[in-house]
Image (cartoon, helix red, strand yellow):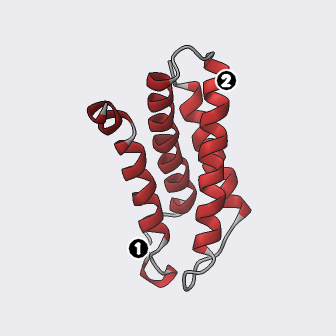
């Protein structure tokens, strides 16, 4: 039982911690790698997060329909995105942004398209 949890849910938890950690970096300390990097990183980060959530839910709730499972993936990931933006609003030189939520949602949607 523990091995199953570690295999399927630990990656989700680690990804959530990584997203939280990156959101905790003050805005003045973020490297400027390329124009539009914020959008790209939000899309990629939440695509990976949604993929991992879907993988775990597929293992634990394989009897559920794909649409039901993907709906839960979206709900879980978007609630996390909203909470992360709220958290980010307390970080110096960072803002909570609807643009970021839309980018997160796009990443979640992309992961859903590529799910099996």
Q: Which mark is residue 1?
A: none
Percent coordinates x, y for residue 88 in the rendering:
58, 72
Percent coordinates x, y for residue 76 in the rendering:
61, 44
Is 98 located above or below residue 8 in the figure?
below
Q: Which mark is residue 68?
A: 2
The residue wearing badge 1 is 31
Rounded to the nearest angstrom, the CA distance separating label 2 from label 1 is 39 Å
Which quadrant holds the N terminus?
top left
Outermost residue, front side:
1
Q: Would you identify the image quadrant in which residue 94 lies?
A: bottom right
* Residue at image location 67% in from the left, 56% down from the top: 101
Q: Nearer the viewer, residue 89 or 41?
A: 89
Outermost residue, right side:
98
Q: Nearer the viewer, residue 88 or 27?
A: 88
Q: Would you identify the image quadrant in which residue 63 lies?
A: top right
* Residue at image location 67% in from the left, 23% down from the top: 68
Give the number of the mark in front: 2 or 1.
2
User: Which badge, 2 or 1, comes first in the chain's sequence?
Assistant: 1
* Helix, strand or loop at mark 1: loop
């Amino acid at each position: 039982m523990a091995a199953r949890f570690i295999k399927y849910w630990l990656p989700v938890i680690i990804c959530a911690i990584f997203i939280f950690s990156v959101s905790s970096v003050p805005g003045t300390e973020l490297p400027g790698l390329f124009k539009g990097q914020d959008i790209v990183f939000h899309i990629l980060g939440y695509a990976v997060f949604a993929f991992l959530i879907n993988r775990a839910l597929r293992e634990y709730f394989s009897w559920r329909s794909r649409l039901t499972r993907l709906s839960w993936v979206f709900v879980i990931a978007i609630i996390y995105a909203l909470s992360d933006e709220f958290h980010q609003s307390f970080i110096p030189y960072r803002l909570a942004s609807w643009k970021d939520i839309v980018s997160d949602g796009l990443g979640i949607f992309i992961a859903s398209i590529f799910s099996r």
